[in-house]
Structure formats: C-alpha cells, structure tokens
Image (cartoon, rainbow, N blue to C red):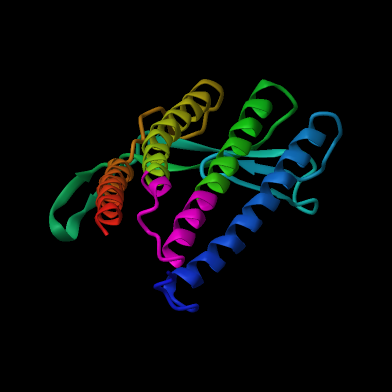
Amino acid sequence: MNVTRPRSPAWFLIILLNVVRVAVAIVLVVTVAFIGLALVADIRGLEMTVVPPSFGVSPESHSNWTISIPVSVAIDGGRIAAASIGVERAELRDLRGSLHFPIQRGRVFIVNGLLLILGVGVLLWLTTELQRVLRTVRDGKPFAPSNATRVRRIAWVLIIGEFVRATIVYLENSYAVTHFTAEGLRFTARPDLSIAAIVEGLIILVIAEVFRVGTRLDEEQSLTV
C-alpha cells in the first residue's frame, strides 16, 4: 500500500538524487576517459584535485597538466600584534590551502588519478544507495529488510572514508614538505581528521539500528495479523 502522495518529499528527493546520480555517473565516465587518455596522449589543460574530488579541462589557462593538493603551512618570521587590545604577539597556526602545480606522467599522476576515480565512484555509490532507500519510503515500505543493511553500509563508508581522506591529506602534505619550498613559509604535515564527520557516521549507524528494529517489529506484526 502506498502511504505517500505522488508529490511527497520522498518523490522530490528521488528525482533530485536521480539527477545527481546521472551527473556523477557522467563525471565518472569522463574522468576515467580523460585520465586514461592522458597516460598516452598530451591533453592540454587537464586539472584535477583529489580532496575534494574535482576534475576539469581548461585549454586556455594551461599548457600542461595541473594538479592541486592540500597543504598545511606555517609562517616563518613576521610579528603579529594588536596594540588596540593589548596583544603584543600573536601566532598564525594551522593554515591550510591548496597548492597548484604542473605535473608530468608518472607515479604521482597515476596515484592521484586513481584516487580521484575512486572518490567519484564512492559518491556515485552513495547516491544510488540513498535513492534505493527513498524508493522504499515512497512505496510505503520504509522498514524493508534491505534498508537497515543499506543505511549501515552508508554509515561505515562515511566513517572509513573520513579516515581514508585524512590519510590522503597527510600524505599530500608530506609530499609538499619533501618537494616544495617557499619564501617566508614552511610546509608542514599534520592529521586532518574531522571528528564531526565521524560523529555523523555514528549517528547514521544509530539510524540503521532503528531501521533494523523497525524491520523486526514490522515482520512480527505481519505474522500476528
């Protein structure tokens, strides 16, 4: 029995997720194609970023491939003060940004290309799973047995994905420390783990448990009718 109206919030969300899923799928196909071609041919203006995943081609701006990696920097020297509030010395800490530089074919390019493809692929998987959950809500079966499993998988992917993202950021920071120098700046490498993202994943795990209990109660009710 369908307990939701044709134009319920779930209906609109399904349409929105379908548009997003199709867009992400196209981006994934194009990303794989361009990175694959870049290994054997010169593609002018290829730009890619692993964290957050993004990809583009700008022939007018570059004559070579460009990669963007997350960096953490500290300022060497330079006095920071605020006489108006009586602060004689202050420090700038944990400055983060992106470092753009041209890159040639090689291990760094291949590894970052594969990570980019993986990131877009995970995003496609997440939108697909969310759409499947919403379809059961639209059909009046929110406690379908598969939903608890889907929501649990989404939670674990978000939690594990945050640890993976933090590791990638640290490795990219370390690459900048090893290979780059800048006047007045010092590149550093430090973990960038988001506790908020992990907490969000744990909250979704709790929701998955609610789905599991709801599924069991729904099955028991069906047996007693």
In the image, 91 versus 86, the foreground residue is 91
Q: Is residue 132 left or right of residue 110?
A: left
143 in the magenta segment: yes
Tell me where residue 137 appears, x and y as whole percent. Answer: 42, 63
- Residue at 49% from the left image edge and 61% from the top image edge: 135
Look at the picture and state if 199 lies above or below 111: below
Tell me where residue 109 appears, x and y as whole percent. Answer: 67, 29
Report the residue that reaches farthest toward the left.
86
Look at the picture and state if 225 lies above or below 51: below
- Residue at 23% from the left image edge and 44% from the top image edge: 90
Tell me where residue 4 appears, x and y as whole percent. Answer: 41, 74
Tell me where residue 159 appears, x and y as whole percent. Answer: 36, 37
- Residue at 61% from the left image edge and 63% from the top image edge: 19
Residues in magenta, as a range: 127-148
Q: Is residue 13 left or right of residue 216?
A: right
Secondary structure character of the magenta stretch overall: helix
Number of marks in the rendered image: 0
Q: Is residue 214 left or right of residue 120?
A: left
Report the residue that reaches farthest toward the right.
41
In the image, 100 versus 84, the foreground residue is 100
Look at the picture and state if 99 lies above or below 171: below
Give the image quarter of residue 49. Answer: top right
90 in the magenta segment: no
In the image, 145 versus 207, the foreground residue is 145
